[in-house]
Amino acid sequence: MNKDRNVLIFSAPSGAGKSTIVQHLLTRYDYLEFSISATSREPRGEEQNGREYFFLSKEEFESRIAAGEFVEHEEVYKGFYYGTLKSEVERIWAKGHVTLFDIDVVGGLNLKKLYGDKALAIFISPPSIETLRERLVNRGTDSPEAIEKRVAKAALEMTYADGFDMIITNDKLESSLHEAERAVETYFKR
Ligand code: 5GP
């Protein structure tokens, strides 16, 4: 067991299949705990406050930035903030758990810099930009304009992949899941 290692970071262009991999790991390893981010965007579909995100108004988000309550925060999409509250990370560590971050690519790199060897940072890559577009269309949660925005952003985000400890290309889900399991077991040894 290595208690000095207590951060697991997942970043990916949206639609790369990151959430599926993250959910799988959370079910499999009791010592992993999801860090619930705060966001100023509206809830989508079945999302609930305090489960997928803490949904804050833009004003509240800004005042909590000013109060220094975030480990990191970013305007991931224009006009919409996302960030990790210090209180959330502390809550998880206090239980002796590994904090699992599902975070955008720039945020992921910032956290890796902040936590260094305490953290394993994994980049989930779609097999191609075209596959990514198809997945977003099939997911059916975004408008065509939103999809094009995400695709353009994804192309840029792919250029950051090398800054991560590991890249998993999510072509066949089954093998990506195994690859992620092996990485977690090797790094955290719990
Ligand atoms: P979505 O709106 O699809 O839930 O998330 C949009 C993006 O924001 C995703 O790439 C997600 O990983 C990222 N994100 C979620 N939480 C955080 C956070 O706390 N900080 C940062 N920088 N990005 C986040």
Image (spheres, helix red, strand yellow):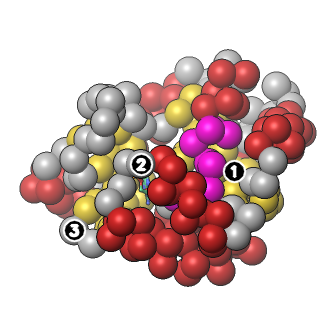
Q: Which residue lies under the disc numbered 2? A: 140
Which of the two discs, 3 and 1, labels the residue nearer the N terminus?
A: 3
Q: Is residue 38 above or below residue 160?
A: above
Q: Are marks 3 and 1 in contact (CB under 8 Å)?
A: no
Residue located 70% across and 31% down the image: 25
Q: Position of residue 24 (x, y in %)?
A: 68, 30
- Highlighted range, magenta: 11-22
Q: Residues within 10 Å of mark 3 (few under 14, many from 20)?
A: few
Q: Position of residue 22 (x, y in %)?
A: 63, 38
Residue 183 visible from this viewpoint: no
What's the CA distance linking mark 3 and mark 2?
Answer: 22 Å
Amino acid identity at mark 1: Ala
Q: Which residue lies under the disc numbered 1? A: 119
Q: Is residue 110 above or below residue 90?
A: below
Residue located 57% across and 55% down the image: 135
Residue 79 is marked as: 3
Lateral position of residue 52 relative to residue 121, left or right: left
Q: Position of residue 92 (x, y in %)?
A: 51, 29
Q: Is residue 116 magenta?
A: no
In which quadrant is the C terminus drawn? top right
Q: Nearer the viewer, mark 2 or mark 1?
A: 2
Q: Nearer the viewer, mark 3 or mark 1?
A: 3
Which of the two discs, 3 and 2, labels the residue nearer the N terminus?
A: 3
In this orientation, which residue lies closer to the viewer: 150 or 57? 150
Q: Position of residue 21 (x, y in %)?
A: 67, 40
Q: Are marks 3 and 2 in contact (CB under 8 Å)?
A: no
Whether disc 3's CB lies below 8 Å from ligand 1 is answered no
